[in-house]
Amino acid sequence: HAKAGGRDSVALFARSMLRDAQQKLTLEHDLGQALDRGELAMHLQLQVDHAGTPAGAELLMRWTRADGSMVPPDVFIPVAEAGGLIVPLGQWALRQACAAWLALDAAGHRLPLSLNVSPLQFRQPDFVEQVRAVLAETGAPPQQLIFEVTEGLLIDDIDQTVARMRALSELGIRFSIDDFGTGYSNLSYLKRLPLYELKIDKSLVRDMPHDQNGTAIVQSVLAMARHLGLRVVAEGIETAEQAAFLAAHGRPYMQGYLFSRPVALGALLDQMDARADLAA
Ligand code: C2E
Ligand code: MG
Ligand code: MG
Ligand code: MG
């Protein structure tokens, strides 16, 4: 009996693996068509300084399927990376970022825009050329774009990464390390890279200011960034208490639901217009 039971559970396990694999394939297949079907959109989430003044916005990809259901990027970005779709999606995202910047500028709102760049996209041999081409085609100023990369990019071929970052920096593009504090712990790379910014991960912000360890890590990152001359954005700010704590400790830029959710470009334009009216 024990043997039969074991065989049954192996069969069950194999079946569930098969189902997972099939779901991934379906997702990958549908994602491949999502661009052409207009199911993808870029939303934008405002970043503010300690006084609440807009300082930038991050572009975040959204996928709404034909039946109205949403697939979160934490699910579909890894699928896109596994299947190679991240390259066309990333190119499309860059075009969208340029178009969004131009639309904001035309409405009188000059905001640097941050874009997540997948390591796979970054490692494409012609990535620099691709970026140069999109900039030339759209006319968006590279000085207004910040590429967010994760520490995962720094694990292998650091020399190539440094060279490529330098080439893009020479175009005017700036770099940010996203999800800082969650990944690779060797900090020596920080001085080798042409960096502009660190983004403190929301998992560190979440426990602040009550959890002593979380708070200590955030304060250390702020101190380190100050010594290195890097700008800091803290992400995932949800409470006024978190914002007040940061305003009293190094005043990093802030991004989170407390200020705004990620919204469509039209809604961001409305937010910015409303602020301008308020200021006038
Ligand atoms: P990320 O780049 O670290 O983006 C920040 C995430 O935190 C976003 O999740 C954002 O909606 C969420 N967030 C912002 N404020 C708050 C808050 O106050 N509380 C909480 N709980 N969450 C907050 P989202 O949009 O689901 O994106 C998840 C991840 O997917 C991103 O993390 C990024 O790694 C990836 N991603 C999104 N768009 C793109 C893209 O265009 N290209 C690439 N390569 N990756 C993308
Ligand atoms: Mg990001
Ligand atoms: Mg992040
Ligand atoms: Mg992330």
Image (tube, rainbow, N blue to C red):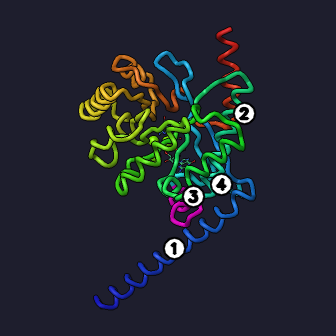
**Kind of residue indicated by mark 4:** Ser
Disc 2 designates what residue? 266
From the viewer's perspective, is the residue at label 3 or at label 2 nearer? 3
Q: Quadrant of the N terminus?
A: bottom left
Q: Position of residue 47 (x, y in %)?
A: 53, 28
* x and y, in percent, of residue 39 in the image: 71, 54
Q: Which residue is mark 3?
A: 86
N-terminal-most mark, 3 or 2: 3
Mark 3 touches mark 1? (CB < 8 Å): no
Is 189 magenta? The answer is no
- Residue placed under numbered mark 4 in the picture: 69
**CA gap, disc 3 to disc 1?**
19 Å
Q: Residue at x 70, y 27 (%)?
A: 105
Q: Nearer the viewer, mark 4 or mark 2?
A: 2
Q: Nearer the viewer, mark 3 or mark 1?
A: 3
Horizontal and vertical percent position of residue 231 = 42, 28
Upstream in sequence: badge 4 or badge 2 = 4
Whole-number angstrom distance, CA of label 3 to CA of label 2: 25 Å
Residue drawn at 60 percent across, 65 percent down: 27
- Quarter of the view holding residue 232: top left
The amino acid at mark 2 is Gly
Within 8 Å of ligand 1, the CB of disc 3?
A: yes
Instruction: Please name the residue that numbered disc 1 is placed on.
Output: 21
Relative placement, left or right, of 57 versus 101 is: left
Q: Is residue 122 positioned above or below 202 on the image? A: below
Query: What span is colored magenta in the figure?
Result: 75-85
Q: Nearer the viewer, mark 2 or mark 1?
A: 2
The kind of residue on which mark 3 rests is Ile
Tell me if 79 is positioned left or right of 62 in this view.
Answer: left
